[in-house]
Image: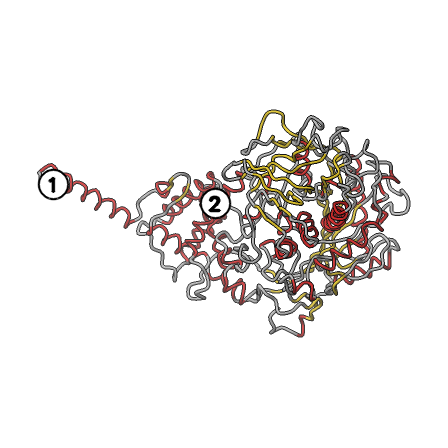
Amino acid sequence: MHRREAVKRIALASIAAMVMTRCDFGEEEVTEFLSEGKLQLNQKHKKYLAQISETFLPIKGKSDRIDPAADFIMTMVNDCKSPADIQKFAVGFNDYKNLMNQSSLEIDTDEPEEVLTVVEGVLDKKESKEELTYFILTVRELSLKNLTSSAFFMEDYLDYQLIPSEYIACYDITKSQNERI
Amino acid sequence: MNESNYDAIIIGAGMSGGWVAKELCEQGLKTLLLERGPDVKHIQDYPTTNMQPWEFKHRGEMPYDVQKENPIVSRCYAFKEDNAHFMVKDKEHPYKQDKPFDWIRGYQVGGKSLLWARQTQRWSDFDFEGPARDGFSVDWPIRYKDLAPWYSKVEKFAGITGNKDGLETLPDGEFLPAWQLNCVQDYFTDVIAKNYKDRHVIFGRCAHLAEAKDIHREQGRTQCMKRTECERGCPFGGYFSSVSSTIPWALKSGNLTLKPYSVVESVMYDEESGKASGVRVIDSNTKEVTEYTSKIVFLNAGSINTVSILLNSKSDRFPNGLGNDTGLLGKYVGFHNYRGKVNAIHDGHINTAVKGRIPTGAYIPRFQNIHRQETDFLRGYAATFFAGRSKQVEMGEGFGHALSSQILDNQPEYGPWHVGSGIMGATIPKETNYIKLDETETDEWGNPLIRISMEYDDNDEKMLKHFFGQFTEMFEKAGFENITQADSKQAPGLDIHEMGGARMGKDAKTSVLNKWNQLHNCKNVFVTDGACMTSTSTQNPSLTYMAISARAANYAVEALKKGEI
């Protein structure tokens, strides 16, 4: 191997190691993941978003008929929000990460009280940064949408059926508490 | 250039074109059915029909980029993730708006018959005699008796569900047994009957098979399953569409040639015979031009496109467009005023709800200016009446386990009944409401861009005010609460009921079509879609287009046999 090539490879490996270390500790600015107006999170941040969603709306273990929240949130943000709102979401995500000082991007979702106290404090304060508030409310709203439009919720709670077996125009609900309606 | 010869050519494979195809093919005419969009085959081309709500990537919402690129169709209530593939995107088919007009289109075999609201009411002579009595437009050259047998024919084949209500304003038809209205709709029916002699709340007659008869099973259709996912295409054929009914029926005859991806440039005119000789077609993919010849031509491309094709069909005899000696072609266009809604809450009937769904609601036929002029506006409006109640999903407060507990530890409970009515107002066709061709710009296929100008007028504003007042009063009499009035101020077009532009009439000097829907001055050309409408009345128009189409097609067959055209 030529000396120049060897040096180049060592240098590349060192850079890769640095990047991997940064990724591992989630030190990137979330806005760095913006590409052509869309937010392409790395696995670490996506997992972190999933934990945030689970902290805001705990549904772990409820059903396997609920889509992974982080996937749904990112699909809806990237596809259904304006470029300005995607940017706002990314900035707000970064603000959230800094606020929580969770550089390891790990949340103990079984002990969420401390995090939720901070989150509710942010929403209570009028002077809170708009992007941070937007991020929190968007994650909350889309987590709820992911749950309430899931097969689990629509079938078990709303009794949705694509093909109703019958139509009853005037149904006495006091006599039918346990029946599917 | 390729050439092919047929007995008949039909331009447009939607609601009315499908009926013409069925009637002509059944009677042995070799028929070419042209459609500018792709083919849609019943069942196999309904890609979303069996998808559950949670299987849609965006849960029904349309992506931002699609909405931004297509602001017009995005304003349509039906433009959703499950059926967007059946609706024309603004960007792909541009047009010019001299005044705002939201043009909603469905370019495919089946056209808008895949997307329609499926409400079907007959016109009465109170509607056909309206222009003559009130002095607008021109007198219709037909009356109810001329169309009644054709309404019956269409209703039996398509399958119309309804009650025989015995109302002079809304003639009864050949109905399949209706479903029941719900408790609150029944209650409102009683309140209105007790308080008003001139008003009726009835079951909304609709093109659904509440019960499938032999004629429907022969079409391969079966009973409506009440899924209310109709705009996706119904695999049961539970509602009428050209795709599930008339076109396969016509194909079965062996007399129909269906050519999708065929953009019609013009109807060709033969100066020597004084007749149309066929149509010039552009392949929408290859842009190859083909001329097809025929003895008769039916235009069923949808009101605005039909008018534009005629305007673009220029010859020495007709330099301003086929049949346009008077300059009337493209003028006197109308639509329906759907701007107003009155909504409320009903706190009664708390122990009842509706189990399942049905694809229609209640309907209140026009009750204004029936026998004489009574208001400060001409004509009038019909209205829908909706009453529903569903389990409410509380979005909860706060975060964490407190939030998920609010949602998951409590079964959703029924909220109050929500009730509402929407106006369906007649507009008066005016010369200033027009469709014309742009003189310089063309579309992808080299056809002139269409210019549209339509607007509401003082008559519409007065009618809307009347609707708000009357329905607020009616809701108050029913004890409904939190009554709100909303004017959407939407541009014309979202009603998807554009009509006229080639109106029927008795006199060639004041109309474009005669009583058989022939161009006055070119008798082997027929127009039987919405373009033929002389006035708009208040009924959903598709049933009338279908009846007019069946009638004109049968006339054409007889006239051909007699050598009259």
The answer to whether the residues at label 1 and label 2 have Cβ atoms under 8 Å apart is: no
Q: Is residue B31 left or right of residue A61?
A: right
Of B77 and B462, nearer the camera is B77
Instruction: Point out the tag, 1 or 2, that comes first from the N-terminus.
Output: 1
Label 1 element class: helix
Residue tagged by mark 2? A134
Label 1 crowd bin: few (<14), some (14–19), many (20+), radius 10 Å: few
Label 2 element class: helix
Mark identifier at residue A38: none
Chain to which the residue tagged by mark 2 belongs = A
Chain to which the residue tagged by mark 1 belongs = A
* Residue A58 x, y percent position in the rendering: 44, 61
* Residue A68 x, y percent position in the rendering: 42, 58
- Name the colouring of the figure: secondary structure
Q: Is residue B65 visible?
A: yes
| Amino acid type assigned to the residue bearing label 2 in the image | Tyr
* Residue A96 x, y percent position in the rendering: 40, 47
Q: CA distance from mark 1 to mark 2?
A: 48 Å
Label 2 crowd bin: few (<14), some (14–19), many (20+), radius 10 Å: some
Of A14 and B450, nearer the camera is B450
Image point (86%, 56%), residue name? B195
Residue tagged by mark 1? A6
Image point (71%, 39%), residue name? B525
Q: Is residue B218 above or below residue B315?
A: below
> On the rendered image, what quadrant is the N terminus of chain A found in?
top left
Q: Is residue B422 above or below residue A84?
A: below
| Amino acid type assigned to the residue bearing label 1 in the image | Ala
* Residue B192 x, y percent position in the rendering: 83, 57
